[in-house]
Amino acid sequence: MRKLLFYILLCCPLAGFSQNENTLLLNAEELLFTGDTLGAIQGFRDVLRAYPASTGAALRLAEIYDKAEDYQKAAQYCNIVIDRILENLDLQETRLNQAIKSGDSTRISGEAYRKNIIEKDLVSLLHLRGKIRRNWERPELAERDLLWALELSPHHPGILNDLALVLMELGAPDAAVEKFKDALNADQKDIIPQFNLANLFYKIGEPDSAVFYYRQVLHLDPYHLPTLKNVAEIHYQRGFYHDALNKYNRIQELEELDYRIVYKKARIYQEKREPKNALDQWDILLENFPDDIDLFFERAKTYLVIMDGQEALKDLQIVKAVEPNYPGLRSAMAYAYLLEEEWKKAIKIAYEQTKEHPDYAPAYLYRAIGYANRNRKRKACKNLESAYTKGIQAEAVPESLISLCK
């Protein structure tokens, strides 16, 4: 698009722009370059007031409003430029036909070349308006513009890619896949259609195809962050934790700390039975989010895995102070007290839990363990029987308790 602007600014004065018009355009460009967007808008509007047919001013206003996400105005100024280009194209078609009739090959070649330049400008503007209309949530109009542009430039990878995105929005994923593939065929080293095609497969539930194209992107750019994040998410969701960790670690090398990734790494380490690594991640999170009781509870569960009841209880007490009825809190506290051999407290909390949830099997097991360690065999065995009845598995029961209740 910038090439088109330069063409307009440099060539159009020779074709009819007044020197004053060109000066006004360049003044507005200077304001835009220095960051005075409002001043530049006013400058380009002043050009259009003085010279209503100024293609350069209308084009720049279209681009500015597109960037500002004022798509209605951007499309309006695109219309001005396209109308002017179509008029020029009609005139050039007439000149070319006259040249053909004359039989002058040099003249024919010159007029054909000028027509080709105008058609390229039209392709650029249709492409721009198509993208604007897509952003403006006018996919049907965007599709029309992009198809028109493709008629003039059938193998343009950028247009093919944007048309595929529009087709996705129109609910035509199969057609979108074909256009993305056409864009890839037009330029095998273009990352954008590779990435968008992978995203499409991810969206429609084909993770293997998505990963294939994400890998193609990473082959071209090993540090493409959006791709690394999406691949890591797929691996995480599918339980491929080793691969997910590799991607998360690479992401952390490339950008500032992303706490969502730290959280997922903590969960992965939990699933991989690597509690010490998980604790490192929970510590990072709690240093930055000290009021998040969910994180305290997750860290407490990790402490329970390594049978550190004392540290687990510290975190669980924090959770209890904020939310006494936090889901799973009583069970975790009962188990932590068992680890610390505080049998009476474990029995008390487990009893409260069975009153609230009479069918929760682990609570009966915790009571049984507590009573056994207080030499209350009858109550221990009665609670163990209840635990079995409620569904506890024999492998979860300590051998000492099984022997006691034979």
Image: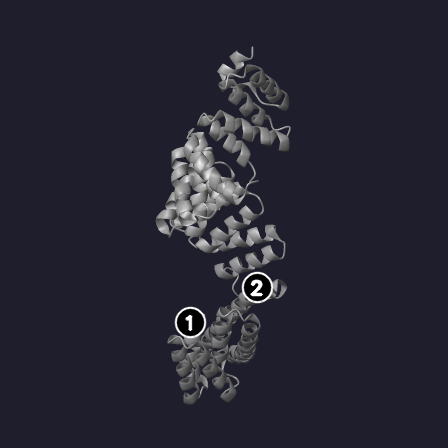
130 left or right, relative to 273: right
Badge 1 density bin: few <14, some 14–19, many ≥20, Cα 10 Å: few
Dot 2: what SS? Answer: helix
Please state the horizontal and vertical placement of residue 248, each as a whole percent of the image. 41, 44
Residue denoted by label 2: 134
Please state the horizontal and vertical placement of residue 226, each as a whole percent of the image. 45, 51
Q: Nearer the viewer, mark 2 or mark 1?
A: 2
Please state the horizontal and vertical placement of residue 9, each as a whole percent of the image. 42, 79
**Vertical comparison of 396 with 25: above or below:** above
| Residue sitting at x 54%, y 25% | 366
Give the amino acid at mark 1.
Answer: Lys
| Residue sitting at x 45%, y 31% | 304
Residue denoted by label 1: 3
- 4 or 236, which is in the foreground? 236
Q: Quadrant of the N terminus?
A: bottom left
In primary-sequence order, the first of circles 2 and 1 is: 1
| Residue sitting at x 59%, y 20% | 383
Dot 1: what SS? Answer: helix
- 71 or 146, which is in the foreground? 71
| Residue sitting at x 50%, y 33% | 333
**Vertical comparison of 332 with 197: above or below:** above
**Vertical comparison of 249 with 188: above or below:** above
Give the amino acid at mark 2.
Answer: Arg
- 128 or 390, which is in the foreground? 390
Please state the horizontal and vertical placement of residue 181, each as a whole percent of the image. 52, 51
Residue 339 falls in image quadrant: top left
Residue extending furthest toward the top: 406
- 355 or 269, which is in the foreground? 355
Q: Is residue 383 visible from the viewing direction of this image?
A: yes
